[in-house]
């Protein structure tokens, strides 16, 4: 069985929209595109380098459309991105659409059932980047095996958020963490069963 691993850059208030640049995703009037740019250092860059190893990808439509217009021309920065299979969760896109046929190894899927089937199949783990609505769907259906988060020391107010309208109650174990010189907490969490409750001090 493959793991579904979510990679996300988030603010302290959980915003994950448009971290890479002003024009990445300005939907909803988002004003702060490129908000991670000032936090890079050697530690941050080394973590990202490891995360960009070849894999398969599970993406929402919007993220896929952004990527399809960029990565085919910049593959030297992300080895294997063009060769890896891109599973695109979308009810709008068709497998015959030019944006799909124009980027090799792209597969359209339309249901949670298809995601479950792919997860149970043999193959590389599935990496999820961006794709806020897809992540919320995965969390709602308890399909996320790991969360790899970069928590940045700022609040952004409005914007697409990682946890919003859908996550189930779930426990995670912290597997690894590091703090960069810019104060970014980079943490990896593994799914760990149900939430346990009790009385503090009992």
Image (cartoon, grey):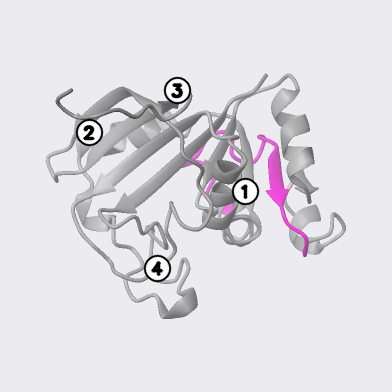
Query: What's the CA distance linking mark 1 and mark 4?
Result: 19 Å
For the residue labelled by badge 4, is the local secondary structure a helix, a strand or a loop?
loop
Residue 83 lies within the magenta run: yes
Q: Which residue is mark 3?
A: 192
Please state which of residues 146 and 17 is positioned toward the viewer in this rendering. 146
Between disc 1 and disc 4, whose residue precedes? 1
Residue range (magenta): 73-92
Q: Which residue is mark 4?
A: 159
Q: Nearer the viewer, mark 2 or mark 3?
A: 3
Between disc 2 and disc 1, whose residue precedes? 2
- The chief SS type of the magenta part is loop
Query: What's the CA distance linking mark 2 and mark 1?
Result: 26 Å
Q: Looking at the rendered structure, which numbered label has been put on residue 59? A: 1
Q: Is residue 66 above or below residue 134?
A: below
For the residue labelled by badge 2, is the local secondary structure a helix, a strand or a loop?
helix
Residue 16 drawn at (x, y percent): 39, 56
Which residue is at 25% across, 53% downward? Answer: 12
Residue 53 drawn at (x, y percent): 50, 29
Q: Nearer the viewer, mark 2 or mark 4?
A: 4
Q: Nearer the viewer, mark 3 or mark 1?
A: 3
Q: Residues within 10 Å of mark 1 (few under 14, many from 20)?
A: many
- Residue 156 appearing in the image: yes
Q: In the rendered image, which quarter is residue 157 located in?
A: bottom left
Contact? badges 1 and 4 (CB < 8 Å): no
For the residue labelled by badge 3, is the local secondary structure a helix, a strand or a loop?
loop
Query: What's the CA distance linking mark 2 and mark 4?
Result: 27 Å
Q: Is residue 19 left or right of residue 185?
A: right
Between disc 2 and disc 3, whose residue precedes? 2
Q: Looking at the rendered structure, which numbered label has been put on residue 43? A: 2
Contact? badges 2 and 4 (CB < 8 Å): no
Quarter of the figure with the N terminus? top right
């Amino acid at each position: 069985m493959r793991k579904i691993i979510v990679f996300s850059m988030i603010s302290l208030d959980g915003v994950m929209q448009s971290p890479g640049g002003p024009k990445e995703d300005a939907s909803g009037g988002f004003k702060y595109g490129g908000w991670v740019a000032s936090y890079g250092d050697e530690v941050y860059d080394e973590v990202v380098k490891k995360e960009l190893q070849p894999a398969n990808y599970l993406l929402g439509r919007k993220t896929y459309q952004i990527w399809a217009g960029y990565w085919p021309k910049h593959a030297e920065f992300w080895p294997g991105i063009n060769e890896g299979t891109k599973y695109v969760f979308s009810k709008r896109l068709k497998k015959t659409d030019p944006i799909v046929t124009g980027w090799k190894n792209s597969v359209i899927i339309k249901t949670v059932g298809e995601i479950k089937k792919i997860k149970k199949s043999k193959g590389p783990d599935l990496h999820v980047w961006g794709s806020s609505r897809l992540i919320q769907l995965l969390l709602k259906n308890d399909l996320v095996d790991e969360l790899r988060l970069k928590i940045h020391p700022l609040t952004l107010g409005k914007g697409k958020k990682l946890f919003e309208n859908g996550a189930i109650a779930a426990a995670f174990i912290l597997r690894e963490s590091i703090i960069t010189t810019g104060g970014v907490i980079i943490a990896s969490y593994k799914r760990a069963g149900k939430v346990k409750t009790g009385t503090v001090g009992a």
